Image (cartoon, grey):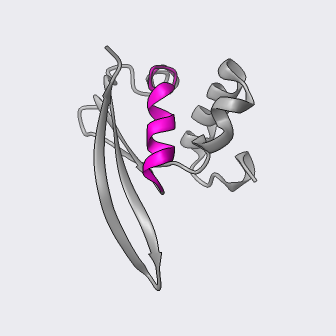
Amino acid sequence: EGISQIQDPLWRRVCIDVLRILGPAAFKNLWKIKLSHISTEGKKAYLISPTIDIAETIEIYNFVIIEALKKFYPALLFLETKVIENLGQNKKKLREKIIFSSF
């Protein structure tokens, strides 16, 4: 599990950077997050988390994630994380939207 489970090459690169900077404790749940997309102006990255607990954990490391993404999107200022729980049988539920800033 972990790096090999990340299909998006950009998100894999970001996760590897976070792993190198902060170590395995920070990476524990990061690989479960998905990078949805980057805003057209490149100022906001949209992430999807499977649980609120994982989203809250990611909040602690948002500054490192933003800095890792800035290598590719220099104007990036914000992360927005949506919590979408899988309820089984192809049902999903949007629980909460969380916005993190680099400031």
Compared with residue 76, is residue 93 higher up or lower down, i.e. above or below? below
Q: Position of residue 22 (x, y in %)?
A: 66, 21
Kindly give the residue lying farthest to the left in the view shown.
41
Q: Position of residue 88 (x, y in %)?
A: 48, 80
> Residue 54 in magenta?
yes
* Residue at figure coordinates x 46%, y 70% from the top left: 86
* Residue at figure coordinates x 45%, y 26% from the top left: 62
Q: Nearer the viewer, residue 91 or 11?
A: 91
* Residue at figure coordinates x 31%, y 62% from the top left: 94
> Residue 103 in magenta?
no
Q: Quadrant of the C terminus?
A: top left
Q: Position of residue 5 (x, y in %)?
A: 69, 55
* Residue at figure coordinates x 47%, y 86% from the top left: 89
Q: Nearer the viewer, residue 33 or 42?
A: 33
Compared with residue 62, is residue 83 higher up or lower down, i.e. above or below? below
Locate residue 15 relative to residue 55 in the image: left or right.
right
Q: Which residues make up the magenta segment?
A: 51-67
Q: Magenta: predominant secondary structure element?
A: helix
Q: Position of residue 91 (x, y in %)?
A: 39, 79
Q: Quadrant of the N terminus?
A: bottom right
